[in-house]
Image (cartoon, rainbow, N blue to C red):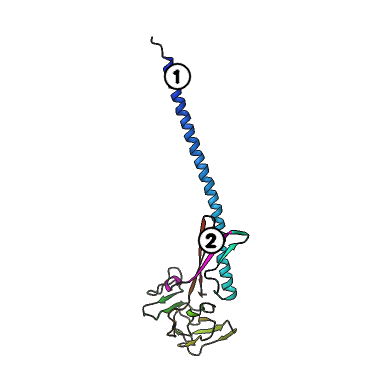
Amino acid sequence: MKEINKKDQRGVTILISVLILSSIVILALAVADIVGRSHRTSKNIGLSEVAYFAAEKGIEGALYTIEKNRSIQGLDGATGQLGTITSATWSREIDVLDDAEATDMDCLTLELPTTSRGLCVDSSQPNQPKIKVKLPPSYSFQLELDFLGLESFIPNALQIDGVNEDNASTTIFDVATGVMTAPEHLNHVSLLDQKPILKITNQSAETKIVEINSNDSGHVDVLLSLLITSTGTYQDQKRVIEVQRRNWQIY
């Protein structure tokens, strides 16, 4: 019987050992990469959360000022910091949404998928957009036009069709003076030199389609909604929060 060459055995053993060690090294490198990625991910999540809180502060500050002071003055383009974390900053933008973004009803069908009330803007007539409100019995529509810094979106007069003094209660509240009045003629509701809140309540037994349009040739759009955008930044992370603040409601 031929004897096995001991040198051949040692060569095979060395080759197997090298393969095993290579596998262990590759496995160790893979584990180290996974741990490293996990650590970086955890770190980025933490930094991203700080950036989010910074963006949130920009939003909350804007909403507080709008509700308390009824003003957007100084809000657009403002910047700030997140408390004591001076390297966490936020920047803010205020935009007026166009008609389609500010509404929730199709003007062609005057229907909503889940409710019988809503608002749309009919822009079929050039330069004469008309707000249409679907108002069920006993429901009220309220439009807030009392914001400082947005005077260019407040017309001097409105024309209201679809309701009259017999089937609806219409009032204008001047926030500046605290005086509430009922317009004498709905086809020309004067808002001149006022900070007004318009309220229309359907007192009839059937759903009404109320149409409102600017009775002032110098105004095309009526302020319906604001978009507040706040960008938070912390180290290499950024978070963006957008909040829509509607200036109308149906209740």
Which range is magenta?
Answer: 87-104
- For the N terminus, which image quadrant? top left
Magenta segment: does it hold 30? no
At label 1, the amino acid type is Arg
Q: Nearer the viewer, residue 106 or 236?
A: 236
At label 2, the amino acid type is Gly
Q: Residue furthest bottom?
A: 184
Can residue 140 be seen here?
Answer: no
Q: Quadrant of residue 89?
A: bottom right
What is the number of the mark on residue 10?
1
Q: Residue furthest right?
A: 84
What is the number of the mark on residue 185?
none
Q: Is residue 79 above or below residue 119?
A: above
Rendered residue at 56%/83% (across/down)? 173
**Mark closest to the chain's N terminus, 2 or 1:** 1
Q: Nearer the viewer, residue 174 or 37?
A: 37
Q: Position of residue 90 (x, y in %)?
A: 55, 63
Q: Secondary structure at mark 2?
A: strand
C-beta proximity under 8 Å, tags 2 and 1: no
Q: Position of residue 128 (x, y in %)?
A: 39, 81
Q: Is residue 31 above or below residue 162?
A: above
Can you identify the residue that label 2 sits on? 232
